[in-house]
Image: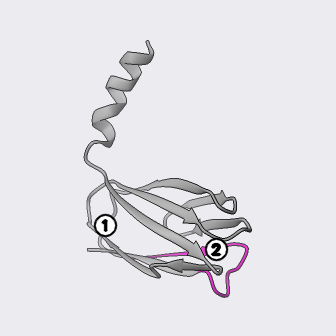
Amino acid sequence: PLVALMFFMGPAFADETTFTIAIKDHRFNPVELEVPAGKKVKLIVKNLDPTPEEFESYDLNREKIILGGREAIIRIGPLDPGTYEFFGEFFPDTAQGRILVK
């Protein structure tokens, strides 16, 4: 059964593109990330700070706490062209970014 599940899930993610965002000094880097419209996207968010941060986006309907020194995977899309804002819930004044979908 597990093999069948893995086989079934494999093609579902085969067409996704991977991008990485880092959190350092309570800031996202890059601040602006361009991704293709109409495609599934896998975001790897690496928290390089020693303290936790929460990736939060009302536009993307996603939130994920990422402990210090850890990383998280956030899947989004396919998305229509436009700008999608995200921020760090714990340090919203500095941890801000946006995804440009083109």
**Nearer the camera: disc 2 or disc 1:** 2
Disc 2 crowd, CA 10 A, few/some/many (<14, 14-19, 20+): many
- Taking depth in this image into account, of 54 and 37 the one nearest to the observer is 54
Which residue is found at the position 33% from the left and 54% from the top?
40
**Of callouts 2 and 1, the N-terminal one:** 1
Residue type at the position of mark 1: Asp
Q: Position of residue 58 (x, y in %)?
A: 56, 69
Q: Say which element carries label 2.
A: strand
Segment colored magenta: 83-95
Task: Note whether 92 is above or below 17 in the view shown.
Answer: below
Q: Position of residue 25 (x, y in %)?
A: 64, 81
Q: Which mark is residue 88?
A: 2
Write down the residue under mark 1.
Answer: 80
Disc 1 crowd, CA 10 A, few/some/many (<14, 14-19, 20+): few
- Taking depth in this image into account, of 55 and 29 the one nearest to the observer is 29
Res 2 quadrant in image: top left
Rendering colour mode: one colour
Q: Say which element carries label 1.
A: loop
Residue type at the position of mark 2: Gly
